[in-house]
Amino acid sequence: MADSYDVAIAGGGIGALTAAVHSARMGRSTLVVGGRAPGGLLLSIERIDGVPGFPEGVAGYELCPMLQEQAVTELRRCAGTQFDPAVVDALCAALRRPMPKAA
């Protein structure tokens, strides 16, 4: 873990993860401090309206795996340039674990 970061993002929801992806793409060293599961409260939302590509809305528990896959792809793409490959491997392994069921 680095001693300092260009950007620190609090939260694990869709907004925080989107900000983290864009920050990393801009070459900033980025720290995300989130909750237990990537996606935050999104997991428990039955229907989210206004998401591009989903004109009828989408359930949070359906959207989260798609977001995780995009995050894994971005992490793998940047491993060795922006991210430590060992950390990427560990994080990707954690993201591949089954997600907790919404309460």
Image (cartoon, rainbow, N blue to C red):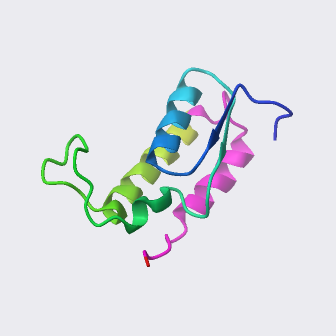
Does 13 appear above or below 77? below
Does 98 appear above or below 19? below
- Residue 70's x, y, as percent? 43, 45
Kindly identify the residue that appears in the image at 61 percent across and 59 percent down: 35
Kindly identify the residue that appears in the image at 50 percent across and 29 percent down: 22
Q: Residue furthest left?
A: 56
Kindly identify the residue that appears in the image at 42 percent across and 74 percent down: 102
Q: Nearer the viewer, residue 95 or 42?
A: 42
In the rendered structure, the answer to whether residue 64 lies left or right of residue 27 reads left
- Residue 46's x, y, as percent? 28, 67
- Residue 69's x, y, as percent? 43, 51
Does 32 appear above or below 3? below
Position of the N terminus, as image quadrant, is: top right
- Residue 28's x, y, as percent? 65, 24
Res 8 → quadrant: top right
Counting labels gives 0
Q: Which residues are magenta?
A: 78-102
Q: Residue furthest top?
A: 26
Res 61 → quadrant: bottom left
In the rendered structure, the answer to whether residue 41 lies left or right of residue 59 reads right
Magenta stretch holds residue 81: yes
Q: Residue furthest right?
A: 3
Position of the C terminus, as image quadrant, is: bottom left
Magenta stretch holds residue 65: no
Q: Nearer the viewer, residue 70 or 20?
A: 20
